Amino acid sequence: MTVSIVTLTLNPALDKSTTTLRLIPEQKLRCTVMKTDAGGGGINVSKGIRRLGGESLAVFPVGGVNGTLLAGILESEGITTSVVNVDGETRENISVTETDTNQQYRFTLPGIILSPEDANKCLKLIDRIRPGILVASGSLPPGLPVTYYEEVASFAKKIGARLILDTSGEALAAAADEGLYLLKPNLAELSALSGVSQLETDEVDEAARLIIERGQCEIVVVSLGAQGAVLVTRDMVKHIPAPPVKKQTTVGAGDSMVAGMVWTMSRGKTPVEMVQMGVACGSAATLNRGTDLFDRAEAERLLNWIENRS
């Protein structure tokens, strides 16, 4: 199989979303029909790439009835998958939006316990493909050490893949020590990588440059939410503005941003074009309620705004 992009999701989930007028304790709450999506960082990236007209292979572990349902949803959406069957039940995440206030409540359940042996089976599947781009995204499930993404980074070097990592906390720090191609931290994650409690926006450029100089990655894209993103390489620093939108949710915005960047990168575009498309897709995702990702037409409309102001 010839695949240029593979996504790795070690902690997949069924994402369920609904709405109710208001969340009130100890009351029976009438909700709208539950919407069920296949979720998890890398899986969402594969879904976003598909929406843009691209192809990728989504690799992830599955267990129980939920795992079968998750894999079936992706198949129905035309996304190519390669799974490792494990014991246990794939987790669920629940998102409830109050229509009265537009506030969203997100309930994240524990992931399936995944052994290092089963996680390594996922890497063996990827080893057979040898993709040019490997996207590892999402949290680590129970059972894996916080250093596991460091092993993924070492593996990516071995097979010659450019690794894009989107995670947080100790898992992010450990993997960065091994060295990656691209990091997409937010301001808090960049602060942690820099060893300080808090960075101001005007300190982002220097902090990102130091990460590159330490050999932790080649490109840093700092996500600033409504302010857009900052692209930092050895040769440039560029702020990419985000278009003003009426935010409905933040669920899936980060994964949509990664999808836009990876799809653009796979087409040989420049780093600036890569981040412009990423910001457009991330911004478009905030326009949708629930756990849905971006609409391609909206992303392209927002991209035009970004290109005219970058």
Image (cartoon, rainbow, N blue to C red):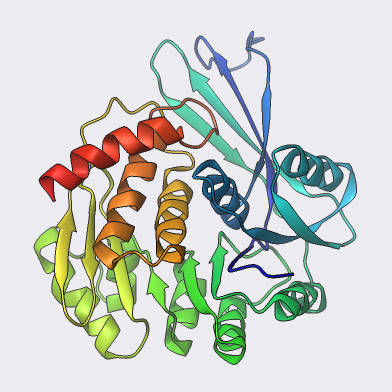
The quarter of the picture where residue 275 lies is: bottom left
Horizontal and vertical percent for residue 38? Answer: 68, 42
Location of residue 246 with respect to 124 vertically, above or below: above
Location of residue 233 with respect to 13 vertically, above or below: below
Q: Is residue 215 visible?
A: yes
Between 176 and 134, the one nearer to me in the picture: 134
Q: Residue at x 53, y 28 (%)?
A: 290
Asked if residue 29 lies left or right of residue 257, the reply is right
Q: Quadrant of the N terminus?
A: bottom right
Q: Is residue 112 visible?
A: no
Between 67 and 30, the one nearer to me in the picture: 67
Location of residue 276 with respect to 245 vertically, above or below: below
Horizontal and vertical percent for residue 241? Answer: 18, 47
Horizontal and vertical percent for residue 48? Answer: 52, 46
Q: Residue at x 40, y 58 (%)?
A: 264
For the image, the number of numbered tags is 0
Q: Residue at x 42, y 78 (%)?
A: 181
Horizontal and vertical percent for residue 88? Answer: 87, 55
Asked if residue 220 lies left or right of residue 150, the reply is left
Q: Residue at x 33, y 71 (%)?
A: 192
The quarter of the picture where residue 19 lies is: top right
